[in-house]
Image (spheres, rainbow, N blue to C red):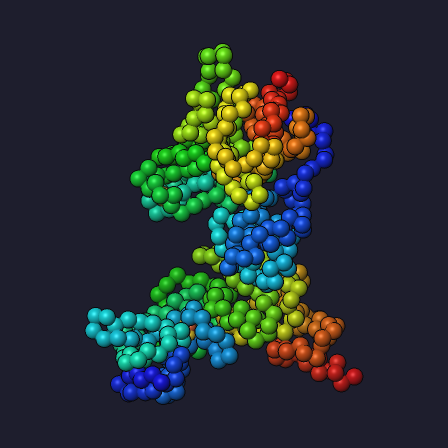
Amino acid sequence: MITLTLNGLDVSVEEGTTLLEAARFLGFPIPTLCHRDGLSPYGACRLCVVEIGEGPKAALVSSCTYPAEEGLKVRTASSRVRRARLMVLELLLASCPQSKTIQDLASAHGVRQQRFRQEQEDCILCGLCVRMCEEQMMAKAIGFRGRGQTRSIGTPFDIKSDVCRQCGGCMYICPACQLRCTYTEPEKAICGACANLAPPCIAQDPFDDMMCYMDPCVACEIARDD
Amino acid sequence: MTQAAAEPDLRGAPPGDEVDPEQIRRIVEKHREDRGGSIAVLQDIQTLHGYLPEDALRMVAEETGRSLVDIYGAATFYRSLTLQPRGRHLIRACLGTACHVRGAPRVVEEFERQLGVKAGETTSDKEFTLETVNCLGACALGPIVVADGHYFCNVRKFGVADILEKARRGVDETRPEDDETVFPLEVNCPRCNHSLMDRGAPVDGRPSIRVTVDFRNVLSPVNLSSLYGSFHSAGGAEIPQGAVCEFFCPHCHGRLGGPSRCTECGAPMIPMVVRGGGMVQVCARRGCFGHRLDLDGVNA
Ligand code: FES
Ligand code: FES
């Protein structure tokens, strides 16, 4: 067991617990975007920043990836943390204003405007879909490509992947886009169910273990009935 | 050269677009032991083909049991790996901070205008590939442009045409030789057109031809005499007489090899581009004296 101080409260947690888990256990709210239970921590969005240490050595770290340390002093809502969080939200808004998730987070934190050049990205590279595809769907159909400014998420060579089962998990979990389903470009399409009401998954053989996330699509249920 | 065109018989898989599964398998096998070896595998494939063909990546994924996503991710992440075939001449213009403030963007624009391609693209005649890089470590001399491995400094917009012209001709000027008793050649790599001349390690008292020789998967630098008719060399002492080696360019790491065979012993001939026009071919067998020189049609 490891004992650390969270907002002045002493708390003991198992070794390997992250600061985020410890804080949530105690009921301190920390907003997150790229963290999901069941997926490995990734630390992409920096929304979950907390302040650790004291005095000049105090530092901001992402709580979803930082493991608890013996005697660590953590503040989850200091003014420095709040400022950083608002800045992160503003930047997220600047890159992806149409995302419902980001809008909700921003309004919950009282962000009413953003001061940066407005962009209209449909991906914030949080990596949720990549981890979903790999860790929950065991597919590894999509991944990161390129780096820096040209980093993007997608299938290799931008064509439909052989290992994609069209489960829709990537779209289900995406906080930024409802746009990744590109049925107008059939070659890149993930599913196309919505466009033609005939999901390709029914035609596939291992139909029973499809593990599907297509929310309104119940084509498989219908197929199972007949 | 004429002979090269007439002989369709290719040794192993030719570097180029055709991907030979056997060769990919061998490369993967070679790196089976090293941890996280996929980068090394990709580098070797790039050496073989000059770029990473899609089929090759799929084969690597299959052979290594890794997912294609990971392989593709690594292949697109590193600057030195490319999924597009490159042209004969590689122009790399620095757009690092220092070069940027010294006017590199205008230089790059001028390259793009004269070549008619955007940075990162290859001209349609496959002559030039234009790339931008972020800092080449010579900031004080910026803007820096590297053409086929030759650095040009303080490049201005009006110097661009000159650089392209030099790259077309071969970047180091041939020095006219007045001594008639020697017959020196200056050669370039037929793949990247980079000069193979090594002035730091003379053989026969002249700048030598530097190549990388692969003998049983051991790479060693070898310096060949640049005097046509002399068979002196330095380096590669462990290679036994009579052994046939693979030759690689030390700059682009491309395999030097062509379709012709040695008329003396039947081993493959290693072609090199002679500056001023023409090809010289030497036998890949150590100790064999087979060689031929084709000076733009004239067979010497
Ligand atoms: S939730 Fe921790 S960095 Fe995104
Ligand atoms: S910025 Fe161009 S060489 Fe450093």
Q: Quadrant of residue A209?
A: bottom right
Q: Nearer the viewer, residue A195 or B152?
A: B152
Identify the residue at image location x=40%, y=79%.
A16
Q: Position of residue A94 (x, y in %)?
A: 41, 66
Q: Position of residue A123 (x, y in %)?
A: 50, 66
Identify the residue at image location x=48%, y=49%.
B79
Whether residue A226 is visible here, answered yes or no, is yes
Q: Residue furthest left?
A: A55
Work out whether A25 lies above or below A170.
Answer: below
Identify the residue at image location x=76%, y=85%.
A225
Q: Nearer the viewer, residue A182 or B4?
A: B4
Q: Nearer the viewer, residue A174 or B273?
A: B273
Is A35 situated left or right of A132 in this image?
left
Work out whether B297 lies above or below A154.
Answer: above
Q: Position of residue B236 (x, y in %)?
A: 50, 35
Is B142 situated left or right of B2 in this image?
left
Quadrant of the image containing the N terminus of chain B: top right
Number of marks in the rendered image: 0
Work out whether B95 lies above or below A108.
Answer: above
Q: Position of residue B78 (x, y in %)?
A: 48, 52
Whether residue B275 is visible here, answered yes or no, is no
Q: Residue furthest right?
A: A226
Quadrant of the image containing the C terminus of chain B: top right
Identify the residue at image location x=64%, y=53%.
B25
Is A5 situated left or right of B223 in this image?
left
**Image quarter where ligand 2 lies:** top left
